[in-house]
Amino acid sequence: MSTLFGIPNVASAIGVQSVAGSMTGQAPVGGDRLRLSRLDPRHFATGGGTPALGQERPASFEDAMLKAMDGVNAAQAESSNAMEAMLTDPDSVDAHDVTIAMAKANMSLNITRTVLDRVVRAWKDIINTR
């Protein structure tokens, strides 16, 4: 039975591995001797520490804006496809679904327009500030 901090079976539940030279039957106590298994890709990299520079690029504002634009484009395409399906085969698509798709596309486009307008206005304010 393994114990960690006096609690039985906790060490095996959280993935503690025994280290050579530690006391038999007990989980290692020193922080430098405690090894945890990586269960999620968001955890520390294998071998400890964070991934080396260049392996994972942090998210940037540009990436966020491009992802948002892709979402707006997908909503517009979905709306166009629903409208086309309604015109070619009216029985295949419900009119409510077409209306909802068009409203989603319109709202996402308006939100994107507003955000981009505010970004441009903020950029101009930063440039004009002395």
Image: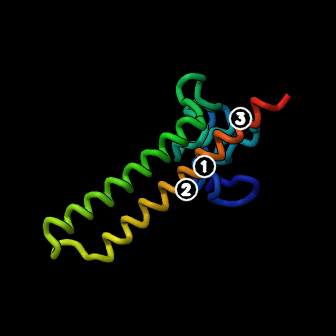
Residue that mark 1 sits on:
115
Viewer-side label of 1, 3: 3
Q: Quadrant of the N terminus?
A: bottom right
- Identify residue for label 3: 124
Q: Position of residue 108 (x, y in %)?
A: 48, 57
Q: Position of residue 56 (x, y in %)?
A: 54, 30
Within 10 Å of the Cα at label 3, are there few (<14), some (14-19), or many (20+) other Cα atoms?
few
Displayed quadrant of residue 124: top right
- The amino acid marked with disc number 2 is Ile
Relative side of 28 to 108, left or right: right
> Circle 2: is it few (<14), some (14-19), or many (20+) Cα within 10 Å?
few
Tag 2 and tag 3, C-beta contact below 8 Å: no
Residue in view at x 46 percent, y 45 percent: 69
Q: How many marks?
A: 3
Spatial CA span between label 1 and label 2: 6 Å
Kindly report the distance in space between the C-alpha atoms of the residues bearing marks 1 and 3: 14 Å
Q: Residue at x 59, y 52 (%)?
A: 114
Mark 1 Cα shell of 10 Å, populated few (<14), some (14-19), many (≥20): few
- Give the color scheme: rainbow, by chain, secondary structure or one colour: rainbow
- Does the CB distance between marks 1 and 2 fall below 8 Å? yes
- Helix or strand or loop: what does disc 2 sit on? helix
Circle nearer the viewer, 2 or 3: 3
Name which residue type carries label 3. Answer: Lys
54 or 16, which lies in front?
Answer: 54
Image coordinates of residue 32 in percent, x first then y, are 73, 33
Q: Amino acid at mark 1?
A: Val
Residue assigned mark 2: 111
Q: Is 3 on the left-hand or right-hand side of 70? A: right
Res 89 quadrant in image = bottom left
